[in-house]
Image (cartoon, rainbow, N blue to C red):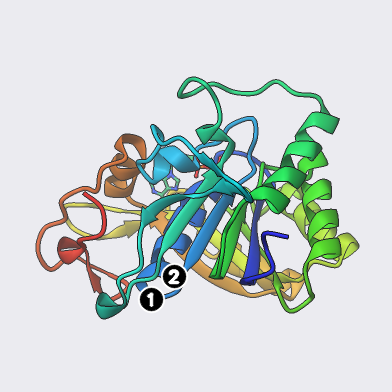
Amino acid sequence: MSLTKVKHIVLILSGKGGVGKSSVTTQLALSLSLAGHSVGVLDIDLTGPSIPRMFGIEDSKVTQAPGGWLPIPVHEANPSAGVGALRVMSLGFLLPKRGDAVVWRGPKKTAMVRQFLTDVLWGEMDYLLIDTPPGTSDEHISLVETLLKDTTPEQLAGAVVVTTPQAVATADVRKELNFCAKTGVKVLGVVENMSGFVCPNCSECTHIFMQGGGRAMADDFGIKLLGSVPIDPQFLVMIETGKRPRYPAGTLVNGQDMSTLTIQD
Ligand code: ADP
């Protein structure tokens, strides 16, 4: 079983598409690896695998080793710099052409999810983040069934639910939380993405949708608000082009000077 040496498995869920689930997965993976942890990202959004593009590695091809598939490295560990290894597996790497999408019936999708969980050689990993499709689909059920069967309760840390300020008022988030309650997956908390827009000129944050929705929802459901991420035009450039934007010297994001990052050019 390829997950035996993975310490913490975290599912990333969202009620609907386009709220930034894959973007949050990408940022979480980079943050954890910059904090020195080894991180794997498994993209099981089979109809729209966007993770390879977000890491700027969409032309990579997965190789088959005797025991299974080798995930694609985004970067290796650099202990002296306090950076952990980051590896990615996605259906995107197995498709013949970049941007192809699969049109599969449920059973084929569930078989693929199971294969991703059993046949990828992750090795020793502190965290495995699993980017799931929007909503609650066959893939989710197959994923959770396999994880509950093949991993220990200590390994399956829980789920992070991503939403946007205007989506918190809809039933979509509630469905995700119900799914977790029914399947016994712990909810680690909610991330509110696209929470306001920070003006690149004056740095003022404008709450274009509404303010405090994520916090109110978290309080309502008795879960944690893990954080709020504003709309960042620089981030959009990075995600769309796969290239790290050049931040001006001294641009601090969560205390990190963005102009000094050296991981990926
Ligand atoms: P999902 O995985 O929920 O479908 P994505 O992560 O693919 O959503 O994000 C949808 C689009 O929104 C992408 O083009 C992404 O670059 C953009 N995006 C997501 N979060 C942000 C953000 N905080 N700032 C700027 N653009 C964002």
Q: Residue at x 58, y 32 (%)?
A: 48
Would residue 111 be visible to someone looking at this image? yes
Give the quarter of the image for residue 115: top right
Disc 2 + disc 1, Cβ < 8 Å: yes
**Does 17 sit above or below residue 147?**
above
Residue extending farthest to the front is 66
Give the quarter of the image for residue 185: bottom right
Direction from residue 150 to residue 167 in the image, left or right: left
Give the quarter of the image for residue 214: bottom right
- For residue 32, which numbered disc appears in the image? 2
- For residue 35, which numbered disc appears in the image? 1
Q: Residue at x 84, y 58 (%)?
A: 178
What amino acid is at disc 1?
Ala
Q: Residue at x 73, y 38 (%)?
A: 112
Q: Quadrant of the N terminus?
A: bottom right
What amino acid is at disc 2?
Leu
**Does 112 sit above or below residue 40?**
above
